[in-house]
């Protein structure tokens, strides 16, 4: 009985190392263009408003039964409330589902750090579209770079 309970709550085991799906640098234009500009190797946001920035959309390819990870290096200044990564996954015939970085938001002013959010996919959950966003509540300044999406299949 105890073994059954452990299996029920055990984390899935990876079947290999993460595979990079897509990496974005400052050369790609973002979907949102207001208050966001390309800045050397990334992007700079400067706004006094609460806004969700639509950064990129992509088809992740043929994936299921694993973990998607949306990761970015982020620096902030004078964030009035909080800022966080947000990823929407569209599953055909099921709708759109999201993952938000509310457990580790940016607040105030911070030097460069890596932030990431996961999205767990079950067997036969094959997204056909990923939407990569950054939400800034209350305004402030944010720099993003090294944005990437990776996938690790489960055993």
Image (cartoon, rainbow, N blue to C red):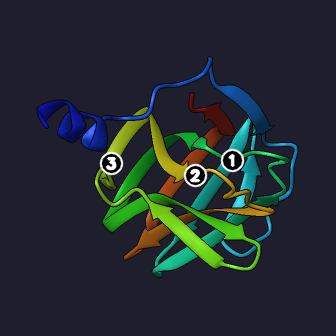
Q: Position of residue 129 (x, y in %)?
A: 78, 64
Q: Earlier in the sequence, mark 3 or mark 2?
A: 3
> On the picture, is 82 further left or further right than 131?
left
Q: For mark 1, give the secondary structure.
A: loop
Q: Farthest top residue?
A: 16
Discs 1/3, front: 1
Q: Nearer the viewer, mark 3 or mark 2?
A: 2
Report the residue at 70% width, 42% height from top.
42
Rounded to the nearest angstrom, the CA distance separating label 1 from label 3 is 37 Å
Q: CA distance from mark 1 to mark 2?
A: 6 Å
- Residue beneath disc 2: 121
Near mark 3 (Cα within 10 A), the count class, few <14, some 14-19 or many ≥20, is some
Q: Residue at x 81, y 62 (%)?
A: 128
Mark 3–mark 2 distance (CA, rounded to whole Å): 34 Å
Q: Residues within 10 Å of mark 2 (few under 14, many from 20)?
A: many
Secondary structure beneath dot 2 equals strand
Q: Are marks 1 and 3 in contact (CB under 8 Å)?
A: no
- Residue 69, percent across and down? 57, 42
Where does the C terminus fall, quadrant-wise?
Answer: top right
Residue 99's spot in the image, x, y percent?
A: 48, 61
Please state which of residues 75 and 59 is positioned toward the viewer in this rendering.
59
Residue 2 disc label: none
Q: Is residue 2 above or below residue 55?
A: above
Q: Could you tell which of marks 1 and 3 lies nearer the N-terminus?
A: 1
Q: Is residue 127 above or below residue 149?
A: below
Read off the residue under disc 3: 109
Seen from the viewer's position, the closer of residues 99 and 125 is 125
Q: Which residue is mark 1?
A: 64
- Quarter of the figure with the N terminus: top left
Which quarter of the figure has residue 52?
bottom right
Q: Disc 3 on helix, strand or loop?
A: strand
Labels 1 and 2: the sequence-earlier one: 1
């Amino acid at each position: 009985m105890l073994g059954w309970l452990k299996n029920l709550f055990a984390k899935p085991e990876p079947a290999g190392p993460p595979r990079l799906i897509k990496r974005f640098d400052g050369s790609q234009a973002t979907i949102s263009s207001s208050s966001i500009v390309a800045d050397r190797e990334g992007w700079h946001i400067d706004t006094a408003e609460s806004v969700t920035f639509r950064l990129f959309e992509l088809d992740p390819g043929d994936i299921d039964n694993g973990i998607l990870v949306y990761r970015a290096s982020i620096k902030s200044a004078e964030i009035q409330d909080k800022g966080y990564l947000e990823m929407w996954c569209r599953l055909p015939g099921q709708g759109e589902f999201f993952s938000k970085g509310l457990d580790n938001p940016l607040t105030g002013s911070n030097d460069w750090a890596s932030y990431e959010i996961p999205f767990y996919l079950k067997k036969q959950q094959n997204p056909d579209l990923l939407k990569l966003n950054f939400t800034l509540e209350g305004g402030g300044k944010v720099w993003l770079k090294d944005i990437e999406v990776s996938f690790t299949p489960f055993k």
